[in-house]
Structure formats: structure tokens, C-alpha cells
Amino acid sequence: MKTIALLIAVLFLYGCPNQTTSGSKKQNKPILNEKSRKAVDGFLKNFGLITKKTYDKSQEEVSEWKQIARKTPECSYLSPNAKVSKNTNLLISPKDGSEVISKINKNDKIAIISRLQNLPEWYLVYNKKCEQGYVKEASVAKLINYGSAKINLAENQNIVITDPQWTSANLIQVKSDGFVSITGAVNKKNGINKVMINNEEVIIESDNSFSTTLNVPKKGLQVRVVAFNNATKIQNLTFDIKVKN
């Protein structure tokens, strides 16, 4: 059946031999255009087949996606907040057996961007080469802070930002635009069990800390952190991140 489908598709794509204007030679004149290709693809899909042009196009898209994933971002100002507990691989997708971007050695420092909400056993990270990819939580040692203030919440505090350091009230200044890692902590004794940063939920770790990464443009960024007890808002913290001139 597939053979018959292929023959029909070939006839549709290329038609029958046509006589040239000189009448001396015959040639196959393709009549394929984008609309007809999609029509043929729809027909071939019923038989588990696609046209070669569609296949080649899909491979080009996959190749482009991989290049984007591997593109070196500006992360020189992204402080490492963890280290690797054993030799592992930086993967192109959060899946065992995924394509390897590069190797990460035991005790290498990494910058955790976020834990995946739907796959909490995986982290999205940058390595020391500024390559972005995925590693399993089992390969990451206890989170560490380099030069940040000790997290120490008073009884009346619900949420604090500990890194980067505050420049003044409601203001944090950074050296350059680009990715900035934000670290903080909540007071679970006061019932805080959910944190939203600019409308995105972040995961609260077992030590009550949380972290996320924001992309700060040259004009700066306003950050809104909201602490919840279930669906009830407990505290709202708003501040600006500005790039030093």
C-alpha cells in the first residue's frame, strides 16, 4: 500500500513527461509548490510517509534548535550557586540519554537558573564555559552561596532577598545588563509555602531558600516578589534592578 501511495505522490509532484518548445527533448517538469507539497504531505501522512523536502526542512529546524540551545549567552555576571558532586554531563534536554553538550567534572561550579516545574529532579544550569543545559539534581551538591549575606529571618519577616546585595532601599544595582541571579529565603514558620517572582512561581528548597534568574535589560527591571500561604497573599516586595552607568 505504501508503494502505491508513493507512486501516486510522485506522479502528483512531477506529472508526466512534457514536450519542450523545441520538440527535440523531453523532460520532467516539477509542478510542486508549497501548497501542493502540504497537500501531498497530508495524503502521505495516512501511510506514515512524508515528502523528502518536508523531511529535509524538519531536519533543518532541529539543527537550528540545537544551535540556539548551544549558543553561548552572556553569563559572566551570573554567580555560581552550586557545585557538582560527581562527574556528569550537561545535556541538551532534561532526559536520560539526551545529547551531551559537554562534560562537567566533580566539584565544578555551576549557576543554577531554575528547577523545572514539571520535572523537579532536573535543573537548568550554566557551566563555567557559559554553556546552558540540563543536569540531574542527584549530580548537584548542596547549594552554596559565594559572598552573599547569611540568611537570617526575624520572626516578623516573611521573605527576604539575600543576593545580589541591596544598594539602597528598594534598589539593587548590577554591573551589566543580562542574566542576574536572585536568591532569597522565606519564613515557613509563618506559613509561607509559595513564592511568585514577576508572575512566575519559584521552588522553595528544603532549607527555605529560593532562587531564580532574571534577564535585566539596559533600562533596568522592576521586580515584584509575592509570598503566599496557599492562595492567600501574605507579603508583597517590589524593588528595582538598575544597570550601573
Image (spheres, rainbow, N blue to C red):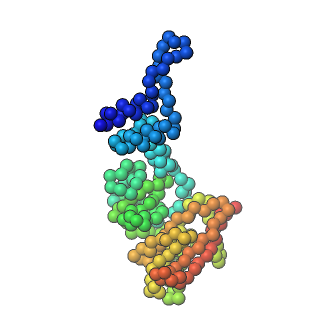
Please state which of residues 95 and 14 is positioned toward the viewer in this rendering: 14
Which of the 4 quarters of the picture holds residue 122? bottom left
Expressed as whole percent of the image width and height from the top left, the position of residue 98 reads 36, 51
Camera-side residue of 195 and 111:
195
Dividing the picture into quarters, in which one does residue 22 lie? top right
Q: How many marks?
A: 0
Left of 50 or right of it: where is 234?
right
As drawn, which residue projects farthest toward the left?
1
The answer to whether 37 is drawn above or below residue 99 in the figure is above
Q: Is residue 126 above or below residue 211?
A: above
Left or right: 170 in relation to 160: right
Q: In which quadrant of the rendered image does the N terminus lie?
A: top left
Quadrant in the picture for the C terminus = bottom right
Position of residue 50 measured from the top left corner of the image (x, y, whole percent): 39, 39
Residue 59 visible within the image: no
The residue nearer to you, when weighing 24 against 78, is 24
Q: Residue at x 53, y 84 (%)?
A: 234
Q: Residue at x 42, y 69 (%)?
A: 143
Instruction: Residue 180 in the image: state x and y as whole percent.
Output: 56, 64
Residue in the foreground of this view, choosing between 64 and 79: 64
Q: Residue furthest top?
A: 24
Dividing the picture into quadrants, the one containing residue 52 is top left
Seen in the image, is 180 located left or right of residue 84? right
Picture residue at 60% right of the left edge, 62% below the top? 216
Residue lying furthest right:
245
Residue 200 x %, y %: 52, 69
- Whether residue 199 is visible here, answered yes or no, is yes
